[in-house]
Image (cartoon, grey):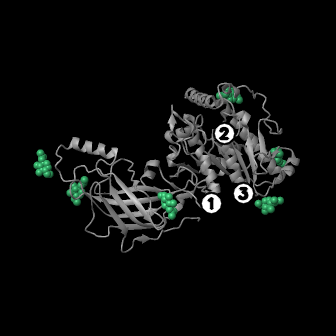
Amino acid sequence: MIQKVISLWILVQCAFVTSVFGENAVLKGEASDFDDLPTNGKSKDGPIKFNMRKSLDLEHEGCYLQTGKKECLEECGFNATAKSIFIIHGWTMSGMFENWMHKLVSAVMQRETEANVVVVDWISMAQQLYPDAVNHTLVVGQNIADMLNWLQNETQLPLGNVHLIGYSLGAHVAGYAGTFVQGTIGRITGLDPAGPMFEGVEEQKRLSSDDADFVDVLHTYTREALGVSIGIQQPIGDIDIYPNGGDVQPGCAIGDVLAVAGNFMEVVKCEHERAVHLFVDSLMNKDHMSYAFQCTGPDRFKKGICLSCRKNRCNKIGYNARKMRKRRNTKMYLKTRADTPFGGFHYQMKMHVFDRKLAVDPDPTFHVKLYGAHNDTSDLYVEVPDYKIGLNATNTFLVFTEEDIGDLLKIELSWEGEGESWSSVWKSFRKNFFSWNTSLNKPMLQVRRIRVKAGETQKKFTFCVPEESKIDISPGESLTFEKCRDGWESKPRKRLPIK
Ligand SMILES: *[C@@H]1O[C@H](CO)[C@@H](O)[C@H](O)[C@H]1NC(C)=O
Ligand SMILES: *[C@@H]1O[C@H](CO)[C@@H](O)[C@H](O)[C@H]1NC(C)=O
Ligand SMILES: *[C@@H]1O[C@H](CO)[C@@H](O)[C@H](O)[C@H]1NC(C)=O
Ligand SMILES: *[C@@H]1O[C@H](CO)[C@@H](O)[C@H](O)[C@H]1NC(C)=O
Ligand SMILES: *[C@@H]1O[C@H](CO)[C@@H](O)[C@H](O)[C@H]1NC(C)=O
Ligand SMILES: *[C@@H]1O[C@H](CO)[C@@H](O)[C@H](O)[C@H]1NC(C)=O
């Protein structure tokens, strides 16, 4: 297993570094030697630096906190009663801060104008072969703990006001800091914590929900390749949010990214780094928050079963997440747009599909179009996780819209006609193949009403066919559902906990 992990990471490293920096760069990371690491963070020139940011201007160097040096606190204008937010990067191939770092720092500083924003710079220890960088996470975490202990002694810094934000390997560094510090850190956010060499290991050796009062984790790249996943798959925090199921992120598909970059590694980077951009989005777009919903797994979520906010089953994602300490490893899901603002709108739709005419294997492919008070959606393909609509059964779907269409007024349900798409060509081929009698009546189903629940508002509506006699639908046809005459809106039992 370890061998596999190492070879994957070497492959990844070489592929990326070679393509971006040329072949000579590959060796660069191995040159330095850290046998004589100063582990007390006393030196500003040591391998671990605490860079307190003083200005949004990237050129501005800021100043450095050093344990034991009181004068630095004054020089940096450290405010012990304000929040302290530490940002911790991960493994690096380039030996430089990547662009996301600047975006995250600036988003944090704009949102929390009084906070002490500190970048933990362990670049030289992170720019190693992956297993060596992993080996350094403990020392870096210990160093952060030392710094926090010293700040507690020196300034009575309340640890509850400390928030560590770690990306990739940096998430596990934050975990070690939480383990070694005296007391309990307020919050740790793990942004797609690294998977290789952390998946399945005991809690002490990775970020876990014991490391802070509240540990929230965003998982954006949990797809496996060669038996490992770059982002950790297992839930490790109090809440673990898996946007888009935690694997394929919209806008990162090979096609989308290749058009821009022409590099497989760009896909990896796009999906792994998406966690950071979702977090930045949550800091910047306060009026367009994304909600995640508790669910036991991605398949149930895709069916729209899990859009409840009762008993704290939903939460805002990213910076705005509410503490839910009693939970452990709560898996939560949401869909997102491909770009900022990432938030969209989730609808659960339930409809009973009757098969009174005894159609032979009608196997419909449905689309819906939603009409709202502000706008309408395009035709949205109704995704059925097990590829089959249940007949004489209530079907539940998840419909996601990128635009805010306002209150829902009307729904158009259409059955994709024969030959309209490759999936229907295949279906009709299959049908003809298995039932050679093609002179049967055309398939016909009946849908009388659609019940809808909006995830973001928790409002429920029922939509009916305007005329009770017109409930039949066949391939190539559509049915329109409007507000039922009576009782079409049911008030949410409980509003979203915070609005
Ligand atoms: C320190 O932070 C607190 C809380 O944010 C704030 O009330 C106070 O004004 C700050 N002090 C200084 C000197 O900026
Ligand atoms: C990690 O460090 C320890 C000593 O601190 C060493 O024995 C071990 O071989 C290192 N592991 C790797 C993968 O470099
Ligand atoms: C903090 O103070 C305690 C007790 O005064 C002492 O034992 C400890 O070593 C100090 N820690 C640091 C990091 O200064
Ligand atoms: C659906 O129910 C009807 C009777 O209401 C029955 O005739 C038909 O066979 C059922 N279809 C399926 C697929 O179970
Ligand atoms: C309606 O939605 C479309 C995209 O579906 C968008 O281009 C248009 O600007 C929206 N109109 C309004 C009024 O929001
Ligand atoms: C084909 O279906 C039609 C109508 O359902 C029926 O009348 C006919 O007997 C069937 N033919 C065969 C060969 O089963």
- Name the quadrant containing residue 129: top right
Circles 3 and 1, Cβ within 8 Å, touching? The answer is: no
The one of 265 and 351 positioned closer to us in this rendering? 265
Percent position of residue 84, x then y: 74, 52
* Quadrant that contains the C terminus: bottom right
Residue 112, disc:
3
The one of 71 and 341 positioned closer to us in this rendering? 341
Report whether residue 87 is seen: yes
Ligand 1 shows up in the quarter that is bottom right
**45 displayed left or right of 1:** right
- Name the quadrant containing residue 317: bottom right
Q: Which of marks 3 and 1 is nearer the N terminus?
A: 3
The amino acid type of the residue labelled 1 equals Lys
For this orientation, the residue located farthest to the bottom is 486
The amino acid type of the residue labelled 2 equals Gly
* Quadrant that contains the N terminus: top right
**244 displayed left or right of 103:** left
The amino acid type of the residue labelled 3 equals Glu
| Alpha carbon distance from label 3 to label 1 | 12 Å
Question: Is the CB atom of the residue marked by disc 3 within 8 angstroms of ligand 1's nearest atom?
Answer: no
**SS at badge 3:** loop
Q: Earlier in the sequence, mark 2 or mark 1?
A: 2
| Alpha carbon distance from label 2 to label 3 | 23 Å
Residue drawn at (43%, 70%), measured in percent from left and top? 490
Percent position of residue 18, x then y: 62, 28
Residue identified by numbered label 2: 90
Percent position of residue 133, x then y: 67, 33
Q: Earlier in the sequence, mark 2 or mark 3?
A: 2
Residue drawn at (58%, 52%), measured in percent from left and top? 340
Residue identified by numbered label 1: 286
Question: Is the CB atom of the residue marked by disc 1 within 8 angstroms of ligand 1's nearest atom?
Answer: no
In the image, is residue 250 above or below residue 454? above
